[in-house]
Image (tube, grey):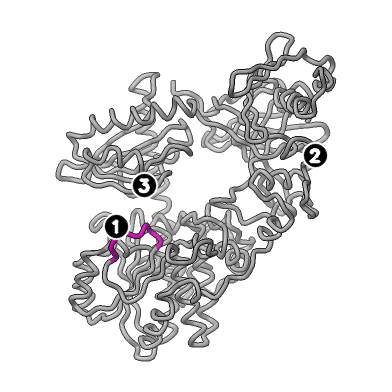
Amino acid sequence: MLPAADERRWLLPSPFGGDGPAEAAGTVDTDLPAELLALLRRRGLLTTEAVRRLLDPEAAPDPEAHFPGLAVAVERLVRGCQRAEAVAICGDYDADGMTSTALLVGVLQRLGALPQAAIPSRMDDGYGLNAAMVERLAAEGVRLLITVDNGVAAIEALERAAALEVEVILTDHHTLPPQLPPHLALLHPAVTPEGSPYRGLAGVGLAHVLATALCRRLRHRHGLEIALNLFCIGTIADMAPLEGVNRRWLLDGLPLLGRSPLPGLQALQQLAGLEKHRVDAEAVGFQLAPRINAVGRLGDPQLVVDLLTTEDPERALELARSCEALNRQRRELCSAIEAEALALLEADGPRRPAFLLLAQGHWHHGVIGIVASRLVERFGRPVALLAGEGGGRLRASVRAPKGFAVDAALTACAELLERHGGHPAAGGFTVRAENVAALQERLDALAGRWLEAAGDGRTVEPEALLRLDRIDREFWRQLQRLAPFGIGHPTPLFWSSRCQVVEQKLLRGGHLQLQLAQGEARLRAIGWRWQGPEQWQGPVDVAYRLRRDDWQGVERFQLELEAIRCSGGDTVVLQRRNRTYWCRRQGDSLVIRNAAGEELRSAFPADGADPAALVDPPHPYVQGLMREAAMALGMVEG
């Protein structure tokens, strides 16, 4: 059998966020609960000012002072709008690229230009603008082209555009090459000043900068609202870092999404069951973005552009239903491919390679990345899934756990690959079939060395110890002040110790449902697509994210489980003041070992007494360490 996904190392922080209760609040003057202050301290927010900037980021500075090419781009677009010029918006087939394209198409058509979307096919064209597309657009009379979420690497295509006298405004956030293609103006985060709040923009953020500057120049307020709506969708869907102007604009824009003037967004929300609820970052990320992404993976991206630019509610609902159908197909494909991948691993026997590389010619290119991510979650190892591309080649999507650099690994295998690209967490490549075995061997060796250093299996890293009786409407309200959550500022992972399992059952679909009790408090917990044990005895520790829903009009809180372990396990890993300690029970002793191999040993306290009292001679740091180790091992209550 495949190993259970909950066989993980727990890496526990100090329950106080520092070295003791006195440091929990530090110098931060705020009314946030102590658990949230401890969490923010771990994320590096150590002062009142730092917390204030998170809760209420500063307004975006003048973008023209940060983007040298913005003024030129706006001037050219003003002329295009005034002359009702044809403008091609050349996007990409992911959610960022499609929302960026729709944003500029929707704004420009309201400002008098004649925009058209030009997005390559994932299956036929691959990523980015190509020369054939440029030639077709030029033949149709297009003399102005805007790239969104791509373009800086399209040297051949844009050299052809220059030869055909087509002007190009480049907006892109991918790595700048040593030599840029010909262009009229460039908007890119890397050209902003060091430390600029615009540095984290995705493609849709750059489209938003361009569109809002143009709307302000032409005094068109309606376009500003449309641009902000689509900025929120694309930024969350692309998992852009939630800092700088991204955070400011999301805080401004998310409350407006529920009453968006765009019929397409209203239709998507209706089909997702969100029309009566507040649309927050979680709803966008888990409800709206997948429906948009499914189109780029399996269908024609023009569908999304039409959906997000139509002004006809009936047409919008029809297009949204098409997105819904593709999303259902995407889910079915993912489930089927995941089942095949697990069967292949099962057939290989109990020993898993360090790097999981699986290939089937019939797998769909558009969804193998999703399945690869699921396998990373399940096994804590880097994964590459390969699908047939024809001509004796296979195309792969690669995903990896935190700490394993996909881009560096692929670069180390470059001579075996036809092409490759990506970043530390994800990437892709094309390989000839005869090179797959050598590639597997090379990647497995790289991953093996990484696993040896990092430790096998997944690590669970809760950020704050939280008692169940602390979870109520007021705590939830305070937690929402830290939202939106995303890349760079994830949804907090809490943990609670020594919870009693009152009820437990496995639901249809493989979800584990528990009723947990701690003192007088009782809460429901759910483990989605659970892979670990289905029955638990005795007190347990749970790591979870807190959710709220309205079940039949009744507000309730739920723990979304990340991991479970029996309380008082033999060994835990404790993180304290950036140092790591291994803590274990050994007979009647508590043993703590540091990275240098030095051990501290103390007798177990009787009847739940404070273990720190047994440290002789007394030392505040060591006493605090003993207390936290005892709590993590379930010896005493938190």
Label 1: which secondary element: loop
How crowded is the residue under tag 1: few (<14 C-alpha within 10 Å), some, or many (20+)?
Answer: some
Say the numbered circle drawn on residue 367: 3
Q: Nearer the viewer, residue 52 or 599?
A: 599
Label 2: element kind: helix
Label 3 sits on a secondary structure element that is loop
Q: Is residue 174 magenta?
A: yes
Q: Which residues are magenta?
A: 173-180
The vertical placement of 613 against 41, above or below, is above
Residue at mark 1: 127
Instruction: Tell me what residue is drawn at x 80 percent, y 38 percent.
Output: 21
Magenta stretch: dominant secondary structure: loop
- For the residue pair 382 and 237, the one nearer the viewer reads as 382
- Between discs 3 and 1, the one toward the N terminus: 1
Q: CA distance from mark 2 to mark 3?
A: 41 Å
**Hey, which residue is sitting farthest bottom in the picture?**
83
Residue furthest toward the left?
A: 391
Compared with 636, 433 (above or below) is below
- Looking at the image, can residue 485 be seen? yes
Q: Is residue 562 left or right of residue 522?
A: left
The answer for how far apart the CA atoms under marks 2 and 1 are is 51 Å
Residue 469 is tagged as 2
Q: Nearer the viewer, mark 3 or mark 1?
A: 1
